[in-house]
């Protein structure tokens, strides 16, 4: 257990600069977009006033006030970039041990004790990064809201209450269960991705890709098959269907971990 | 500690930031509804069954079921909450009854707390199951399909209304989509009797009401050769059928026979004008009634819900941010049986009305 | 005794690289695995360490299937790039219960390595020496060395060769692969010849000299008929 | 120390010791380095050092008691025998080399005397 945590720390230490720079970059850009939108809106009103020679209130009536929701509309794109970067990190966290000047994979595979700690060290690193991203993203939203209220002129502002764009509301639904669901889905994706990577690293090139395709087909078949059987049997109540679906999800999640550990133990190659 | 520095940092960051998020969630004020009765008694049977469905689509989407006696049920939704929610109201019904009503050949009627479910697995027999709220027992009856019905292809049986001990059902051929037949099932005597409504077998019957054996219905007959169809109103006691004239188009509004069977109520509601017409079966007289109701629609142009059930008009209208006026009106006498205002303490503009649920 | 039984290995559809390799490494002796380029020498070492999966075959150490008694010194750098030598030594101390800091310190002194040096900035010679430190500073009865002398200067070679005649050898069974056989032939107790994925010959070097008067190099010429 | 790759290393070590004994660099009863020290000193594998010492014990060149450093034998006979053995071997090699180029004995003898005396003198002057 202690070694697993130390290994996790090692994984994070190696990409620490990257993690910090991504967080700062994303936060910086998001705040800039809010500041930019406020300034742009203000200039829009001023220009309209001078151009149409109307009072400020008339100009605002036509151009409409700016809400934080609109000011933060770019957040969802930046978050998408963040998600993409995390997925990249999930791939890089493995491949850097094979590629690159030093072949750390030798050291990892030679460590005494169970190789499961290698998988879980990288898995926990991803988990910590993902949860921190979600948490910090919320802090940035609150921070931008403060900056928004501080910068904008009172009568330019649509509403003083915090409003989130539709996509942001999908992520921040003000319900902790949803955060748990999102993190679980993210971790499932990470685990599935890890399995694919380990498949490639074990069987390399052609055979590896073949197995990856097989695994992807497997998950699709299981999902579709499950739904089809449930439809045809048609004896299940909706709750039972949900329970079955969740059971399939949990079992498959465990399968991806089990398969990865088996590959690490028997099939992996330097 | 040196060995876990970065793990600890990220763990602390996660816990701290999610903590901030949790604190923010707790800080969101939720709506708090009170009901101010203006007229009538919320305990009246017609009013007790009303549940106003309101939902708050602000930052935190919450659903509220407000009963007019002030009792409020609050439900916060999350991604998986509706996974385990039982869609049909029969939450507490026994599992096999819920399984029965789930099958797609079964249709259901809820009346006075009893759920009647009927279906024809094949056109040789009809299955009926009914369950009373709160009881564990489910009554199951299987009848041989009447001769007339066997001729049809795949039939869909729709229980219409229970009057006394008999349950009126209409059956409809799903394949040919032509013709509807009306049957009366005697629940005590377990017998099925066909009620002949003298109408060509092609036309589709829409029942408007039944009162001591007299059935009022209309038929959409398309004028031969054209695709335009005209509604024709009929009254029949199973033996003789009389055509009722004098009432123009009514099929787009909600139409029902009044409780005493004397008048047809046609309710039409267009945003701000709220009116209904009464058609006297005997005198063929048409009276137009209306009532002015203050309505301030929200930013999406919504804020009103009106329905006609068991001869009464139920309507809910948004007066202002977070204030909804609910009325129960007797269409015959224009009398307001009940009126009350549901008030949201926070006067939130995000609170909006989903509708009235009449148990 | 470190015993290798029937190692078989094929990379994809190519010709199998190992077709049933069996040999053993005695404790307290230096065994050298000899084979021409591409014959699969380091594949055998990696297979013994479980770094590459094998199609068949087992590796027993004193009768058990466990690698905790074998240390491995690959011919490439295995520590993460950003680490200094000091970090790497701490790393080894954290993860290896049988890590011997005293031996590590001694060897660091002998090899004149500084804990502040960044590993990836070390010269090839120093990197090779540092890898040896990581291998020898583990109290394990068997040690696998993959090309310890590859591509390093004469003086570093002498330092490394010195270790083979030092007390650090006691209590250890060494299995090594090398192409610089000439310089260290006198240090080797036993030679194992590998060809076409199989062990084709094995000799005790002193015995071969005494009985046949042949050096390892002579035997190599005969075995590989070049 | 350089080694001939084709003859057993341990025998070459024994020979190295014999030379030391013959030239009395190693006196009778003198302690000799431990197996570990000699391995490091000569750059040979500890097993080879071990084998060399065992061979010397068998030839009674050295005596070893439990965990006490080995000593050169006190027996002068053995020392004398080593000297003659070394001489015979050197002479045998010399003769074999000289016969290879068919020089008559007389010439060989006079040559040896003159060369031997001149090297002695040079050793005295140095």
Image: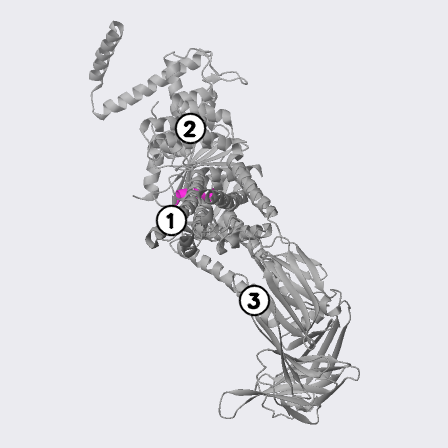
Residue wearing tag 1: A40
Q: Position of residue C125 (x, y in %)?
A: 35, 30
Q: Quadrant of residue B208?
A: bottom right
- For the residues labelled 2 and 1, the Cα–Cα distance comes to 75 Å
**Closest to the observer: A7 or C57?**
A7
Query: Which of pointers 3 and 2 indicates the residue nearer the eye?
Result: 3
Q: Is residue C194 left or right of residue A172?
A: left
The residue indicated by pointer 3 is: A227
| Number of disc labels | 3
Output the chain of dot 1. A
Image quadrant containing the C terminus of chain B: bottom right
Q: Camera-side residue: B289 or A140?
A: B289
Marks 3/1: CA–CA distance: 50 Å
Secondary structure under tag 2 reads helix
Report the span colored magenta.
C40-48
Towards the viewer: C150 or A245: A245
Residue B21's image quarter? top right
Is A266 magenta? The answer is: no
Q: Are marks 2 and 1 on the same chain?
A: no
Q: Do the numbered discs 2 and 1 sit on residues whose CB atoms are within 8 Å?
A: no
Residue A145 position (above or below residue B137): above
Residue at the disc numbered 2 = C164
Q: How many other residues sit within 10 Å of disc 2, few (<14), some (14-19) or many (≥20)? A: many
Q: Is residue A144 visible?
A: yes
Give the Cα separation between the discs numbered 3 and 2: 67 Å
């Amino acid at each position: 257990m202690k070694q697993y945590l130390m290994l996790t720390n090692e994984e994070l230490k190696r990409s620490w600069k990257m993690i910090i720079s991504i967080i700062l970059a994303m936060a910086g850009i998001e705040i800039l977009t809010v500041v930019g939108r406020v300034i742009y809106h203000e200039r829009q009103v001023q220009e309209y006033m001078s151009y149409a020679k109307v009072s400020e209130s008339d100009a605002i009536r036509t151009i409409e006030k700016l809400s934080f929701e609109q000011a933060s509309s770019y957040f969802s794109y930046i978050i998408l970039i963040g998600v993409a970067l995390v997925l990249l990190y999930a791939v890089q966290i493995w491949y850097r041990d094979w590629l690159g000047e030093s072949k750390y994979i030798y050291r990892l595979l030679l460590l005494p004790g169970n190789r499961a700690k290698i998988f879980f060290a990288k898995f926990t690193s991803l988990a910590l990064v993902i949860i921190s991203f979600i948490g910090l993203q919320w802090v940035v939203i609150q921070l931008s809201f403060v900056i928004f209220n501080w910068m904008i002129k009172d009568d330019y502002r649509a509403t003083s209450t915090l409003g989130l764009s539709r996509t942001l509301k999908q992520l921040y639904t003000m319900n902790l269960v949803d955060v748990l669901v999102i993190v679980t889905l993210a971790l499932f994706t990470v685990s599935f991705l890890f399995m694919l990577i380990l498949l490639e690293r074990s069987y390399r090139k052609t055979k590896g890709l073949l197995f990856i395709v097989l695994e992807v087909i497997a998950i699709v078949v299981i999902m579709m098959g499950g739904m089809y059987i449930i439809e045809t049997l048609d004896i299940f109540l909706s709750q039972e269907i949900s329970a079955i679906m969740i059971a399939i999800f949990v079992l498959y999640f465990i399968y991806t971990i089990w398969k990865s550990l088996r590959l690490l133990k028997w099939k992996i190659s330097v | 500690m040196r060995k876990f520095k970065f793990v600890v940092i990220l763990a602390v960051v996660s816990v701290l930031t999610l903590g901030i998020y949790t604190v923010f969630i707790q800080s969101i004020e939720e709506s708090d509804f009170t009901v101010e009765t203006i007229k009538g008694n919320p305990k009246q049977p017609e009013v007790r069954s009303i549940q106003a469905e309101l939902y708050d689509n602000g930052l935190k989407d919450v659903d509220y079921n407000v009963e007019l006696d002030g009792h409020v049920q609050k439900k916060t939704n999350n991604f998986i909450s509706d996974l385990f929610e039982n869609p049909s109201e029969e939450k507490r019904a026994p599992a096999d009854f819920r399984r029965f009503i789930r099958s797609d050949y079964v249709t259901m009627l809820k009346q006075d707390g009893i759920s009647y479910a009927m279906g024809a697995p094949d056109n040789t027999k009809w299955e009926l199951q009914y369950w009373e709220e709160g009881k564990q027992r489910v009554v199951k009856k299987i009848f041989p399909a009447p001769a007339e019905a066997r001729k049809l292809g795949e039939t869909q049986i729709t229980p219409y209304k229970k009057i006394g001990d008999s349950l009126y059902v209409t059956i409809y051929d799903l394949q040919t989509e032509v013709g509807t037949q009306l049957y009366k099932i005697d629940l005590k005597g377990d017998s099925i009797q066909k009620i002949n409504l003298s109408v060509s077998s092609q036309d589709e019957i829409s029942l408007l009401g039944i009162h001591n054996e007299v059935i009022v219905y209309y038929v959409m007959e398309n004028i031969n050769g054209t695709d335009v169809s005209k509604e024709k109103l009929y009254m029949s006691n199973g033996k003789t059928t009389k055509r009722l004239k004098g009432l123009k188009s009514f099929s787009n509004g909600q139409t029902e026979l009044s409780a005493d069977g004397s008048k047809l109520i046609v309710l039409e509601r267009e945003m701000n004008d709220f009116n209904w017409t009464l058609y006297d079966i005997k005198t063929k007289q048409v009276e137009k009634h209306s009532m002015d109701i203050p309505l301030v629609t929200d930013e999406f142009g919504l804020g009103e819900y009106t329905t006609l059930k068991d001869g009464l008009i139920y309507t809910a209208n948004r007066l202002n941010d977070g204030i909804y006026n609910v009325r129960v009106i007797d269409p015959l006498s224009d009398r307001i049986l009940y009126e009350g205002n549901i008030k949201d303490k926070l006067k939130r503009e995000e609170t909006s009305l989903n509708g009235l649920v009449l148990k | 005794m470190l015993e290798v039984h029937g190692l078989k290995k094929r990379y994809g559809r190519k010709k199998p690289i190992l077709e049933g390799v069996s040999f053993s490494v005695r404790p307290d002796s230096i065994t050298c695995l000899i084979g021409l380029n591409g014959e699969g020498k380091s594949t055998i070492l990696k297979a013994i360490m479980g770094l590459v999966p094998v199609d068949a075959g087992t590796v027993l150490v004193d009768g058990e299937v466990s690698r905790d008694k074998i240390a491995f010194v690959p011919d490439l750098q295995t520590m993460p790039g950003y680490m200094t030598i000091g970090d790497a030594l701490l790393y080894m101390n954290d993860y290896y219960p049988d890590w011997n800091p005293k031996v590590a310190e001694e060897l660091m002194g002998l090899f004149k390595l500084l804990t502040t040096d960044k590993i990836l900035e070390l010269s090839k010679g120093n990197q090779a020496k540092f890898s040896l430190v990581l291998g020898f500073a583990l109290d394990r009865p068997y040690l696998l060395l993959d090309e310890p002398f590859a591509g390093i200067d004469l003086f570093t070679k002498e330092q490394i060769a010195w270790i083979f005649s030092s007390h650090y050898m006691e209590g250890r069974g060494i299995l090594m692969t090398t192409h610089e056989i000439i310089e260290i032939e006198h240090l080797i107790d036993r030679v194992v010849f590998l060809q076409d994925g199989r062990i084709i010959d094995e000799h005790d070097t002193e015995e071969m000299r005494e009985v046949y008067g042949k050096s390892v190099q002579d035997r190599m010429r005969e075995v590989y008929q070049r | 120390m350089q080694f001939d790759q084709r003859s057993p290393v341990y025998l070459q070590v024994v020979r190295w010791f014999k030379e030391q004994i013959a030239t009395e660099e190693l006196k009778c009863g003198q302690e000799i380095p431990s197996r570990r020290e000699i391995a490091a000193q000569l750059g040979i594998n500890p097993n080879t050092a071990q084998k060399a010492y065992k061979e010397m014990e068998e030839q009674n060149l050295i005596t070893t008691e439990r965990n006490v450093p080995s000593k050169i034998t006190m027996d002068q006979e053995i020392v004398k025998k080593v000297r003659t053995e070394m001489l015979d071997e050197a002479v045998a090699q010399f003769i074999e080399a000289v016969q290879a180029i068919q020089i008559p004995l007389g010439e060989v003898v006079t040559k040896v005397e003159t060369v031997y005396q001149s090297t002695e003198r040079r050793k005295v002057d140095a």
